[in-house]
Image (cartoon, grey):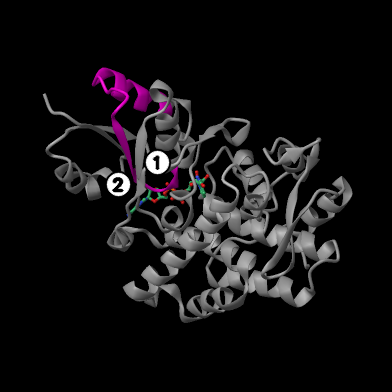
Amino acid sequence: VKAFQVMIVTNASIAPLYLSSVQEAFSKFQCDVVVIPDGEAYKNQEGLFAIYDGLIENQHHRDTTLVALGGGVVGDITGFAAATYQRGVRFIQAPTTLLAQVDASIGGKTAINHRLGKNMIGSFHQPHAVLMDLTTLSTLPEREFCAGFAEIIKYALLVGGNFLKKVDALLEQGYSSMTLPQQADLIAQCCDIKANFVQEDEKEIGRRALLNLGHTFAHALEVYTNYRRWLHGEAVGIGLYCAALLSYASGSLDKCHLLSVDSLLANAKLPRRIPKEIDLDKLQDLMFSDKKIVNKKLRFVLMRAPGDCYIETEITADSLRYVLMNAVEGEKS
Ligand SMILES: NC(=O)c1ccc[n+]([C@@H]2O[C@H](COP(=O)([O-])OP(=O)(O)OC[C@H]3O[C@@H](n4cnc5c(N)ncnc54)[C@H](O)[C@@H]3O)[C@@H](O)[C@H]2O)c1
C-alpha cells in the first residue's frame, strides 16, 4: 500500500496532452485520475459528483491531495470538491490556460455553476500550492489565449499606470509574437496584482470586489446562453465594455477612456458587444440573480479612469437598460 494519495482531476482535452507527465511525477504515490468532459457547461453537479465518485471508489482519505490539471473550469470544480470532500482536503492548482494562470488558480474561490446562476455553489478554499508550467500555453488555441487577455485587461484597468501601458504595448505588438520571457513577466505581474487584492480581503468583504469589474454583465451573458456560447473570458470582454459604457453614461468616465477600453478589447480580439438576438429584458433579470447583490441592490464596479475604480450601488434599472441597449452590436455609442 502506497503511503500518500493523490487524485488528479483533468478534462478529456487536456488528458492526452499533459496527464502522463503529471502522473509520472506522482508515481511513488497512490495516484488516481478523474477525467471530466470539457467545457464551462460541465462545471456542474455532475462533474462534481464524478470527482466524489472517484475519491470514494478509490478510498481516498482526509489526507489525500487533489490536483487540478487544466483551465479555470477544472480548477474551480476541483477546488470545490476539495473544499467539501470529507469536510475539506488539500488541493493543488496546476493551471494550463492563460486565464487560469493569471487569475482563476489564485485566491481560493472555488465553485460550480447552477443552471440559474454562475458560480452559485461554492466556497473559499485556498490551494496548498499553485504550480504552473508556462510551456503548456504552447498548445492553447488562440481563442483561449484571447479569453485569458480579458482578465489581464481587467487588471490593467484596475491598476492603470505602467501595467496598463505594458498591456497596451503587448496588444499593439500582437501577442502571438510575445516571447516566453515576456509571457512569464506578464503572468507573474498578474499573479502579484491578484494576490495583493486577495491578501487584503480574502472573503471579499471590501476591496476584492473590484476584481469583479465587468463580471456582473459577463455572468448574466453566460447564464443566458447556458454556458455554451462564450468562453468565460469572452463574456468578460463584453462585460468590460458594458462596465466602461455604464461608467461613461453615469458621468464618471471620459469618452476617450471609453474608446481606449474598446480598443484594448479589440486588439485582444475579444467580443465587445451584446449580440442582437439577446433579449435585454431577460438579460437584465438574470443580472438581478447575481451574487453581488446587497440589500437587493446590484453592485457595479465602475471606472473614473484606468487605475481608479469604485463600487457603485445606486444604478437605476433605467440607466442599466440604456447601457445594455447601447452595448448591442450595431449601436453607436
Ligand atoms: N476562481 C476564480 O477566482 C476564477 C477567476 C476567473 C475565472 N474563473 C473561472 O474559470 C473558468 C474559465 O477558465 P478558462 O478560461 O481556463 O476555461 P476552461 O477551463 O474551459 O479552458 C478553456 C479551454 O482550453 C482547453 N485547454 C486548457 N489548457 C489547455 C492547453 N494547455 N492546451 C490546449 N487546450 C487547453 C480546455 O480544455 C478548454 O477547452 C470559468 O468557469 C470562470 O468562472 C475562476
**Residue at 64%, 57% in the rendered image:** 238
Q: Quadrant of residue 23?
A: top left
Judging by the rendered image, the residue that carries numbered circle 1 is: 74
From the viewer's perspective, is residue 171 above or below residue 103? below
Observer-nearest residue: 34 or 192?
Answer: 192
User: Which of the two marks, 2 or 1, is nearer to us in this view?
Assistant: 1
From the viewer's perspective, is residue 50 above or below residue 305? above
Q: Quadrant of residue 264?
A: bottom right
224 with respect to 41 (left or right)? right
**Residue at 53%, 33% in the rendered image:** 122
Identify the secondary structure beneath mark 1. helix
Q: Quadrant of residue 177?
A: bottom left
Look at label 1 and name its amino acid: Val
Mark 2 burial class by Cα count in 10 Å: few <14, some 14-19, many 20+: some
Can you tell me whether the CB of the residue at mark 2 lies under 8 Å from the nearest atom of ligand 1? yes
Q: Is residue 269 visible?
A: yes
Mark 1 burial class by Cα count in 10 Å: few <14, some 14-19, many 20+: many
Q: Is residue 282 visible?
A: no
> What range of the chain is rendered magenta?
47-73
183 with respect to 278 (left or right)? left
Identify the secondary structure beneath mark 2. loop
Determine the CA span between mark 2 and mark 1. Answer: 10 Å
Can you tell me whether the CB of the residue at mark 1 lies under 8 Å from the nearest atom of ligand 1? yes
Of the numbered discs 2 and 1, the one sitting upstream in the chain is 2
Residue 35 highlighted magenta (yes or no): no
Residue 168 in picture, x, y percent from top left: 55, 77
From the viewer's perspective, is residue 209 above or below residue 31? below
The mark total stands at 2
Look at label 2 and name its amino acid: Ile
Instruction: Verify CB contact (< 8 Å) between mark 2 and mark 1.
Output: yes
Judging by the rendered image, the residue that carries numbered circle 2 is: 14
**Residue at 55%, 63% in the rendered image:** 270
